[in-house]
Image (cartoon, grey):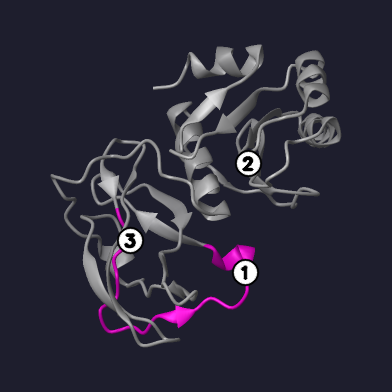
């Protein structure tokens, strides 16, 4: 499914309104932009519930053959429905020519929890963590990600992360002999920052633009190594 971003006419299954949808592109580790291949013959479906295992699809880079997981394509209709845009899974095995004019985005605007996860994944890859995946065990709150040597929590809540949240991530990381990283949309309480400082746990705040901003010394040190 690695190739140029393509557009598809999508009909809302709830209200019948038609939309022009363009597949998002994401940067592969080799630097080539990749995008899911859309299925013009498929029918969009209304998302009625969330299943974490179905939130991601495999997208293969045609330049180097690397396969990564990215959020499945979705489109929000003004009627309130969220549509799952059909993808051509067969095309993912053969690949499509990469687009020469599609930029390798390093950040995505955050409107939903899925966008927050995508922003965190992009940032982690800029740190050199290419094999980012869903964590085997879900955290008590937020969304868990993992890669070799790291355990990550993405917190899309509207309230600042607490000291307990920080401690839970640190304990999970310690149990796996890994480094914990915390990404929050709403920031952190003063107690959470103090506890993270003692535990040397990097804290990042995700800006609405999708940029990850380090907010303590361990995070600043990591940020200095980003591409």
The location of residue 111, given as percent across then percent down, is 49, 52
Q: Is residue 51 magenta?
A: yes
Dot 3 crowding, Cα within 10 Å, few <14, some 14–19, many 20+:
many
User: Front-most of 50 and 79?
Assistant: 79
The residue labelled by disc 2 is 146
* First of labels 2, 3 by sequence position: 3
- Residue 46, relative to residue 184: is it above or below? below
Residue range (magenta): 35-55
User: Front-most of 178 and 56?
Assistant: 56
- Residue 113, relative to residue 151: is it above or below? below
Q: Which element type, helix, strand or loop, lies under badge 3?
A: loop
CA gap, disc 2 and disc 3: 22 Å
The location of residue 45, given as percent across then percent down, is 45, 81
Q: Is there any visible trace of residue 129 in the rendered image?
A: no
Dot 1 crowding, Cα within 10 Å, few <14, some 14–19, many 20+:
few
Dominant secondary structure, magenta: loop
Quadrant of the image occupied by residue 54: bottom right
The residue labelled by disc 1 is 50
- Tag nearer the camera, 1 or 2: 1
The residue labelled by disc 3 is 36
Q: Which element type, helix, strand or loop, lies under badge 1?
A: loop
- Tag nearer the camera, 1 or 3: 1
CA gap, disc 1 and disc 2: 20 Å
The location of residue 81, given as percent across then percent down, is 49, 76
CA gap, disc 1 and disc 3: 20 Å
């Amino acid at each position: 499914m690695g190739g140029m971003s393509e557009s598809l006419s999508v009909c809302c299954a709830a209200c019948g309104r038609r939309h022009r949808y363009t597949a998002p592109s994401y940067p592969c580790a080799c630097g080539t932009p990749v995008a899911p291949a859309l299925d013009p013959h498929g029918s969009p479906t209304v998302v009625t519930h969330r299943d974490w295992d179905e939130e991601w699809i495999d997208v293969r880079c045609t330049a180097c053959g690397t396969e990564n997981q990215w959020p499945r394509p979705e489109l929000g209709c003004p009627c309130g429905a969220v549509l799952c845009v059909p993808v051509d899974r067969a095309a993912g095995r053969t690949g499509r020519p990469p687009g020469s004019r599609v930029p390798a985005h390093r950040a995505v605007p955050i409107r939903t929890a899925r966008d927050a996860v995508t922003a965190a994944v992009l940032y982690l890859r800029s740190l050199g963590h290419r094999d980012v995946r869903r964590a085997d065990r879900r955290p008590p709150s937020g969304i868990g990600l993992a890669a070799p040597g790291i355990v990550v929590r993405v917190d899309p809540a509207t309230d600042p992360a607490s000291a307990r949240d920080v401690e839970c991530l640190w304990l999970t990381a310690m149990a796996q002999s890994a480094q914990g990283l915390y990404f929050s949309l709403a920031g952190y309480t003063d107690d959470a920052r103090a506890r993270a400082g003692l535990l040397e746990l990097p804290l990042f705040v995700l800006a609405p633009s999708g940029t990850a901003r380090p907010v303590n010394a361990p995070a600043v040190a990591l940020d200095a190594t980003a591409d």
